[in-house]
Image (cartoon, helix red, strand yellow):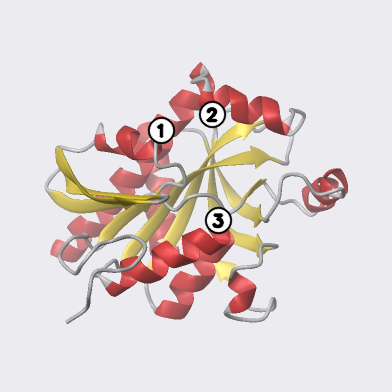
Amino acid sequence: MVERQPHIQCRPGDVAPFVLLPGDPGRIHAIAAQLDRWEQIACNREYRTITGTFRGMPVSATSTGIGGPSTAIAVEELIRVGARVLIRVGSAGALQPGIRVGDLLVAAGAVREEGASAMYVPPAYPAVSDHAVLAALLKAAGDLGVTAHAGLVRSHDSFYTDREDELTRFWAGKGVLGSDMETATLLTLARLRGVRAASVLNVVVPADGGLEEGINDLVAGKEAARQGETAEIRVALQALHALWTEESG
């Protein structure tokens, strides 16, 4: 029998097959507010897990903390206890003009500029979303009237490198929509482990905005960022529900 997982502190049966992955443990409360019912399963370090239902669908949410390493740990352990479809609901900085705070980025794939996924496979291995989960996210966004931009994102490991402006300009010039820290790790690991995954990101920093100002706006609950957070959760839950309904026949 599989033991309680050492980091997320969950056992088989604690976690639903459909899982949302916010980075911030505080976002778990925002997810819980959208569920029919829920209970907290475990809370250890950055990993807070709840399980409940959404329109009859069993669903869980586990916070992953900041960055690829903690995300990889959460994903590995969630898969061990039964997770099969995982959607990141995170935040991002935009790299393209015209993408506003509160808009959503739906990642078709991710530039693997973080280190965690490189511990598994060489950089030539692509980080791509599961096509069915991606399609469900885009349909949910359209049905809900949410502004969503689909394309590539970039995942990285630090906000404060000496080359940050240079790197941002480089990837913006390659058409990358925005940057986060976890999407590439999730997509790479999910593909390697044979589960389905995708990522939807709430834009908290515009392309011409400052990083610290954008993050502070999110923390302070500025209206556009707050609405974007609610929207990404609704989109992700509706997408999972559509997939669950299809599987249930």
- Which is more toward the observer, 18 or 133? 18
Whether residue 126 is visible: no
Q: Label 1: few (<14), some or many (≥20) within 10 Å?
A: many
Q: Who's the residue at 69% across and 78% down the image?
A: 124
How far across and down, in percent of the image, does residue 119 sit? Answer: 61, 77
Residue at the disc numbered 3: 182
Disc 3 on helix, strand or loop?
A: loop
Q: Nearer the viewer, residue 13 or 143?
A: 13
Please tell me which residue is depicted at 77% across the width and 29% down the height of the picture. Answer: 208
The residue pinned by badge 2 equals 102
Tell me: 25 left or right of 127: left
Residues tagged 1 and 3 counted as in contact (Cβ below 8 A): no
Give how far across and how far down residue 220 sits, in percent: 52, 20
Counting from the top left corner in percent of width and height, residue 221 is at: 49, 20
- Give the residue pinned by disc 1: 231
Q: Which mark is residue 61?
A: none
Q: CA distance from mark 1 to mark 3?
A: 19 Å
Is 78 left, or right, of 156 in this rendering?
A: left
Pointers 1 and 2 in contact (CB under 8 A)? Answer: yes
User: Which residue is nearer to you in this view: 24 or 238?
Assistant: 24
Q: CA distance from mark 1 to mark 2?
A: 8 Å
